[in-house]
């Protein structure tokens, strides 16, 4: 089942640099959202905040109506504040949120099949069931015949497709993809985009950080343009990509195109 995502009043700083500066965002269940913006605009930090890999300084994220990473507590003086959840509960929440990193992050000593099965086994799924599910997912991303290969025996595009299969292994309600093609040679980009395109067609809630503007125009229901940690413009791709209203958006698109 896919789930909605809501980000309210999100603020995140690293030292004196405010990377996310008051972001409010609502994404429907089953939607495909592409986040565009220049380097340093806060795109990856926003993605990591959604699954609480980067705890926010202020604000809150909810997925399917459940607050992620924190809970609201009322003090003796009646004031309310958010308190960090125990790590065990955060890990449970993250099991519903698939994350695909830029640089694959596969275990080098495990086969493709074992990399995909590892998460479900750690979550308590029996190993035979986890391995069958992993094989099905490798078939889904076009790598059923490479199940026994270790990461060093796979191309970058193949490794990223294994990483996508791994992100799907716990049947998440949301999948976050952080520039999934940025570490790939240009000739390998198409095979990974093809897998993401099939995910977009499946009804999974996707949030994709990418510089692939043509791909964003094709698959996105919603496009968000960030700059200096703020949402400059958002809306359907026909609006944000084809007829942007803000000069900063127009300038960015002219450069990346």
Image (cartoon, rainbow, N blue to C red):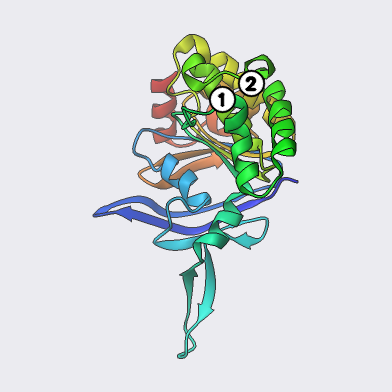
Residue at the farthest top position? 187
Dot 2 crowding, Cα within 10 Å, few <14, some 14–19, many 20+: some
**Mark 2–mark 1 CB contact (< 8 Å):** yes
Disc 2 or 1, which lies upstream in sequence?
Answer: 1
Residue lying furthest bottom: 77
Question: What distance separates the C-alpha of mark 2 from that of mark 1?
Answer: 7 Å
Label 2 element class: loop
Q: Is 6 on the left-hand or right-hand side of 139?
A: left
Name the residue located 39 percent from the left edge and 35 percent from the top edge: 248
Q: Can you say whether 57 is above or below 209 in the image? A: below
Which residue carries the number 1 mark?
Answer: 111
80 relative to 130, above or below: below
Does the image show residue 36?
A: yes
Mark 1 secondary-structure assignment: loop
Q: Pointer 2: what residue?
A: 147
x and y percentages locating residue 228 in the rendered image: 35, 44
Q: Is residue 94 left or right of residue 10?
A: right
Of residues 226 and 107, the one nearer the viewer is 107
| Residue 141 to residue 168: above or below | above
Residue at image location 67% in from the left, 24% down from the top: 138
């Amino acid at each position: 089942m896919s789930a909605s995502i809501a980000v309210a009043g999100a603020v995140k700083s690293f030292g004196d640099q405010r990377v996310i500066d008051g972001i409010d965002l609502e994404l429907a269940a089953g939607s495909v959202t592409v986040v565009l913006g220049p380097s340093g605009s806060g795109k990856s930090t926003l993605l990591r905040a959604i699954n609480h890999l980067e705890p926010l300084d202020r604000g809150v994220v909810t997925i399917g109506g459940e607050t992620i990473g924190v809970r609201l507590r009322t003090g003796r003086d009646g004031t309310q504040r958010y308190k960090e959840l125990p790590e065990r509960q955060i890990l449970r929440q993250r099991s519903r949120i698939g994350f695909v990193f830029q640089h694959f992050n596969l275990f080098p000593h495990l086969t493709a099949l074992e990399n995909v099965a590892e998460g479900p086994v750690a979550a308590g799924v029996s190993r035979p069931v986890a391995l069958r599910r992993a094989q099905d997912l490798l078939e889904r991303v076009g790598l059923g015949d490479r199940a026994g290969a270790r990461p060093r025996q796979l191309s970058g595009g193949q490794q990223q497709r294994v990483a996508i299969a791994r992100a799907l292994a716990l049947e998440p309600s949301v999948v976050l993809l952080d520039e999934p093609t940025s570490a790939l040679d240009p000739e390998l980009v198409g095979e990974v985009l093809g897998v993401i395109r099939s995910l977009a067609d499946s009804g999974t809630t996707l949030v994709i950080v990418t510089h692939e503007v043509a791909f964003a125009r094709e698959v996105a229901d919603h496009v968000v343009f960030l700059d200096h940690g703020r949402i400059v413009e958002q809306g359907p791709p026909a609006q944000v990509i084809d007829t942007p209203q803000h000069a900063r958006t127009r300038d960015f698109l002219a450069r990346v195109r």
